Structures are given as structure tokens and as C-alpha cells.
Image (cartoon, rainbow, N blue to C red):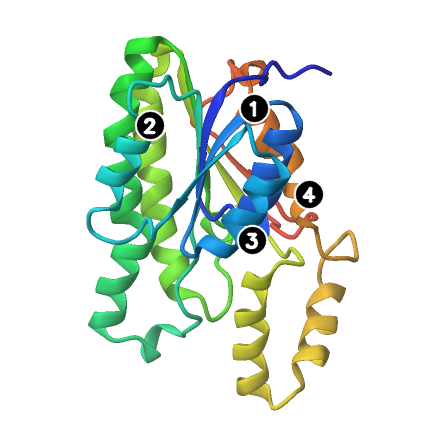
């Protein structure tokens, strides 16, 4: 299927690792152009070398002050067709382990910059009559995950923001959707296994194997599994889907909705 992405311009956060890298590469393989964002330049250079005429690298931390202004300067007068709103998550902690400083930092890393970015780019998309915004959050927005109270709490705020905005601009041609990944074989999941290992005294490998046994499909997902759905949501084909939270979790969320 031709997803209609050739020569379209996308902004992809975390483009050198995990979900961000998989989505960036999937877009590039479809002939799209990508403003690839990551904190360090090395991985961006490798991505640009592989797709020299399609990748525009931008080395910065999206959660830091001043980053959104730098992103907007990089976009300039170009029409931006879509964004993968994606960055790393907070540390694994229980509710009573957290300090108020942890919550302040999590607000900055999980919520604040996403609101700022979307508020900056959405008006341009609305003016153009087209746009796709996909947030990478977590399956915890539907079913809380153990030892991830910061993520469990503040990612719900992102969902509330995205859902509300999707309703407000539904007739504009701009859609907003949330993807909630469950357990995937990416670097981000290791912090969860490490925390559980510290609590139980089991090895991280034992914790990992036990966790896999709890996944209904019996295995971890891959970043490419996740990217296949993200790619469709970023395409013109998804025009009738907005304001939705879709979990990609091998069946782990037990709720009906």
C-alpha cells in the first residue's frame, strides 16, 4: 500500500534509538523527509549518511528550555506534515519513593515540552489544512505499571491534552492520536527490569523472562512492530481517526477499552 508519504516533512523525536529510530527509518523508506532530533549528534550523522537527501539532523534535548524555538527555526517556512512526539521517560520509582523534585522534573520531561511543541506547530498545520500528530506515551495510560508512578500519572495528562485539542480542531484536517506501547525489546524497558531486580533480588534476566511470560502473545514486541502502526497514523490514510489512545502491547492491557 502506498501511504502517500513521499516528500512529506516530518519531525521525529528520539530519532536515533528505540521507537523514534524505527519510525524515522520507516518514514524515510516511504520517501518522506525527516527532521531527526536526538540529544547527541553521532546517531544523527549515521542516519543522515544512510539517507543523505532526506534527513535534516537536529541535535538537542527537546525537554530543555529554548529547544522548541530551535525546532521552529529548523522548520522555517516549510510545510510540516506530521510529528512523532517522543522522548525518554522518567526513572522507575514507587509512589512513596518520589520527592516533589521528582514530580517537578517529570512534569518538565513528560508534559510541559509536549504542550509547548504542539502549541507552536499546530497553528501552522491548521492554516495548511493538514497535519498528523502522534504521541508516544505508554500502555500505563490504560493500566498502571508497577514502579512507574511518575509515568503512570503524568502521561495521563498528555492524553487529556491531546484528546481535548483533537476535539477543538477536529474539522481542521489535523489529527492527534496517542500510542501506548507495552513491553518492547528497546533500551527503555531495561530500567523497569533493573528496578524489579533490585526489589526482588532476582537477576535482571530472570525478571525479564518472568515478565515475558505475563504477555498474552508470549514475547516482547519490537520497535518495528510499533513503527508499522505509527507510520499509518502519520499518513493521509488515517484521516478519520483522531483523539484515540491505542495500546501496542501484545494484549497485556486487560480492560475492554
Q: CA distance from mark 4 to mark 1?
A: 17 Å
Image location (x, y in percent) of residue 185: 67, 58
Q: Which residue is mark 2?
A: 75
Image quarter in which the N terminus is found:
top right
21 vs 167: above or below: below
Q: Earlier in the sequence, mark 4 or mark 1?
A: 1
Q: Earlier in the sequence, mark 3 or mark 1?
A: 3
Q: Which residue is mark 1?
A: 32
| Residue 190 picture quarter | bottom right
Residue 224, label in figure = 4
Say what secondary structure mark 3 lies in: loop
Residue 17, label in figure = 3
Query: Quick check: 54 left or right of 97?
Result: right
| Residue 116 picture quarter | top left
Say what secondary structure mark 1 lies in: loop
239 vs 225: above or below: above
Amino acid at each position: 500500500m502506498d501511504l502517500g508519504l513521499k516528500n512529506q516533512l516530518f519531525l521525529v523525536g528520539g530519532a536515533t534509538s528505540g521507537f523514534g529510530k524505527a519510525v524515522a527509518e520507516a518514514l524515510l523508506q516511504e520517501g518522506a523527509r525527516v527532521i531527526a532530533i536526538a540529544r547527541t549528534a553521532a546517531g544523527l550523522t549515521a542516519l543522515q549518511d544512510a539517507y543523505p537527501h532526506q534527513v535534516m539532523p537536529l541535535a538537542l534535548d527537546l525537554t530543555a528550555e529554548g529547544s522548541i524555538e530551535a525546532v521552529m527555526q529548523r522548520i522555517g517556512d516549510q510545510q510540516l506534515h506530521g510529528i512523532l512526539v517522543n522522548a525518554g521517560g522518567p526513572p522507575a520509582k514507587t509512589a512513596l519513593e518520589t520527592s516533589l523534585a521528582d514530580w517537578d522534573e517529570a512534569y518538565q520531561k513528560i508534559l510541559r515540552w509536549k504542550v509547548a511543541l504542539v502549541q507552536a506547530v499546530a497553528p501552522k498545520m491548521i492554516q495548511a489544512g493538514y497535519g498528523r500528530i502522534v504521541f508516544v506515551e505508554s500502555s500505563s495510560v490504560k493500566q498502571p505499571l508497577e514502579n512507574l508512578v511518575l509515568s503512570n500519572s503524568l502521561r495521563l495528562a498528555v492524553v487529556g491534552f491531546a484528546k481535548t485539542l483533537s476535539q477543538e480542531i477536529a474539522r481542521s484536517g489535523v489529527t492527534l492520536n496517542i500510542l501506548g506501547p507495552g513491553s518492547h525489546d528497546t533500551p527503555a524497558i531495561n530500567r523497569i527490569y533493573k528496578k524489579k531486580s533490585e526489589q526482588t533480588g532476582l537477576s535482571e534476566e530472570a525478571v525479564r523472562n518472568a515478565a515475558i511470560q505475563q504477555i498474552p502473545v508470549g514475547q516482547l514486541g519490537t520497535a518495528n512492530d510499533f513503527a508499522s502502526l505509527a507510520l499509518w497514523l502519520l499518513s493521509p490514510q488515517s484521516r478519520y481517526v483522531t483523539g484515540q489512545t491505542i495500546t501496542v502491547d501484545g494484549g497485556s492491557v486487560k480492560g475492554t477499552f
